[in-house]
Amino acid sequence: MPLTPILRKPSVMSPVSNKKVLFCMRETARSLIFKFRDTRDPSVFASTFEILTTSASEDEKISWLSQMTECVPLLDQKVDLLVLEFLKIPWYKLEKLSIAAESFIINLVTAHNYYTYSVLKQLFTLITGLLLSGVDDEENERAGVLSENQEAYCWRLVGSICAIHKQVPMSRDHLLTLARKCMPYFRRSIHDHVAYTHSLLLLASYLPHLRVGLLEVIVTNMITIDVHTPRSELMKDLEDEDSSDEEEMFNMEVDDGDGTIEAIRNEIREDPCMSHRDGNTLDVLMDMMFHYIHDICHGIKRTIQLKQNIINSENAVESRKNEKMCHLKSERVCHPRSVRYAELENQRTVGCECGGTEHDLEALKSLFSDLKEVFSRIILTTHASSHTQFLLFYLLALRPGLATHFLEYLRVKKFENPNCFRDERRNAMAYIGSLLARGKFIPFSHVHSCLEIICAWCYRYLDKQETVQTTNYEDLQLHSPFYFACQTVFYVFTFRYKEYTENSKKLALAQSLNLERLVLSPLNPLRMCAAPIVSNFAAVTRRFQLAYCYTIMENNKRLQIPSSSIDEKTLGSTSLDMFFPFDPYLLVRSRGYVANHYREFDGLPEEIVEEGDSVKDEEALDMIVSPKSLDFSYGLSPGYQKW
């Protein structure tokens, strides 16, 4: 039997013994702080913090949080590195730990406010930094679904951020700055975006005075994803999915009477995920925002009472659990995708299923004001977005009375304001035209009133040019606002011509617009506007004898014939750079929110297609699209599919 040395203790040096961990954990927070203050060596606390991160028990972690809370007066700037590393330990995975961690953080920022920025930055980083470790279901990750534990994790982090803001009100600027800086890269995992957006919406509910800034951060991220997701790619992916689904159903072996084909068809129909990665991310975020808008409009608020300095209390834990479970009303007033139609007009919608009777008007007005401000700063100045702007479309569909105020705001504050940039005035008129054409919730009387106002502005502009003969000629750069307005008039009138031609009284309203003066004006808008819009407008107005455009269109074609005296750049500058933002919605999961409120183009009059011989110029008919195939999508920005 081998002899054991007297000074050697095998139990202490044994690799399988846990006494080494216990020896390290006997290190107190106070002694650790003093050691690091003297040496400034990170190795002093590295091993202890590693044990706290990996193998320490819950009781040991709570004990360390209590010790650090007692030592807060010692945590000055000389030990800032120790404090920052201590905050990186995952304290928010468990309920009891999060309460103790919140107590430590509140005491820390109250005693030393220079830690506020660092603490908030760490909390914002933790929202996405640790969430992916709990994602096991690949399908849920692809669909952007948060589990109950992940939602609770976000709630605890947001609760601590709100508690810091309550104790340090001057942290408001830090909150918005960090919310913007810590936003995940737009190509990151969909789970990162869902968790971060979910947390910012919670934060906006707790801190209403910061909602505009937080919504601006969310919308900016969605716009970034939107402009990197061209409509052409989404349409191609949707076509590929449809073709593959059909092949899968036809190739499936069918047993006797088991309904296999129907089961496959239902499975395909219920699958909400898109194959396009960025498109799927944007689809999930749009779904979240639509739900948020619906909840706020119906007074469904997230409520929580922030508690501080309560540690190791069973009542506190139960209270936090109850607050987490009761943050929303148990039942919704109406479904977010529901719709209600007008009694006398089957095609016009008047909001959601409740018809506005259950709306919280104060909350709705406040949300509309905030979203309008975000729209003015972010969405209106972006030319290539395809879907983010439907957030305003959905809000206006829920409360159609707001559409009048929104249209007036775009016309007076943006388009008619000479101090606005040219692109901003162009986009404002594009939103007016697209909303009037696509919104089922806008009645015909409002459409006609808007067209009357726009036409009146155009006529005043023409009168002014007639008095000033030096500028009374066609020029895209010189008269661009006039051409923007004319293209909107042509687009809206062609889109809703059936309502103008229902009876003689409404046809008289169309005649009162005096569209022929726009067509025959010296500024020649038919040459500057988009060719598909001009072609269909000419066909409709000719059918109902409101204006005759084909002679002018022929003259414009002759002007565009290349010659040695005309430069190619001059020819390229005659096309109007303009888009209509509410073109068909292509995202699969969130399409149901706007589909019922969205107007599809009914096609041109059948007589135009049948009476092709009545038009002398056959080339003019080449641009008139069949009513069966025309969807009236005139996206001219790089992110849109060209006509």
Image (tube, grey):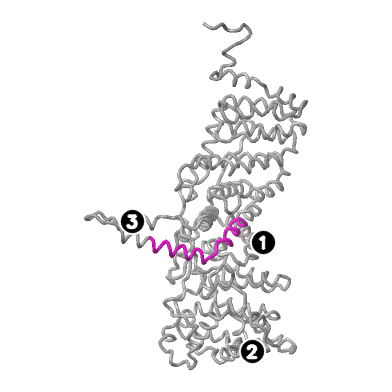
Q: Is residue 327 visible?
A: yes
Q: Position of residue 480 (x, y in %)?
A: 67, 78
Viewer-closest of 98 and 40: 40
3 or 1: tag closer to the N-terminus: 3
Magenta segment: 219-244
Q: Position of residue 545 (x, y in %)?
A: 50, 90
Using a 10 Å C-alpha cutoff, classify the residue at mark 3 as few (fewer than 14 neighbours), some (14 to 19) or many (20 or more): some
In this view, 246 is above or below 464: above
Residue visible at 61% across and 35% down in the picture: 307
In this view, 349 is above or below 334: below
Q: Position of residue 536 (x, y in %)?
A: 51, 82
Viewer-closest of 43 and 339: 43
> What is the secondary structure assignment of the residue under circle 2?
loop
Q: Nearer the viewer, mark 2 or mark 1?
A: 2
Viewer-closest of 330 and 612: 612
Seen as rendered, the residue at the extreme front is: 2
Alpha-carbon span between mark 3 and mark 1 = 45 Å
Per the image, is 235 magenta? yes
Which residue has dot 1 on it? Answer: 377
Amino acid on which the number 1 mark rests in the picture = Arg
Which residue has dot 3 on it? Answer: 264
Q: Which mark is residue 563?
A: 2
Q: Does 251 sit left or right of 545 as displayed?
A: left
> What is the secondary structure assignment of the residue under circle 1?
helix
Magenta stretch, main secondary structure, is helix
Using a 10 Å C-alpha cutoff, classify the residue at mark 2 as few (fewer than 14 neighbours), some (14 to 19) or many (20 or more): few
Residue visible at 58% across and 88% down in the picture: 557
Amino acid on which the number 3 mark rests in the picture = Ile
In this view, 411 is above or below 479: above
Alpha-carbon span between mark 2 and mark 3 = 60 Å
2 or 3: tag closer to the N-terminus: 3
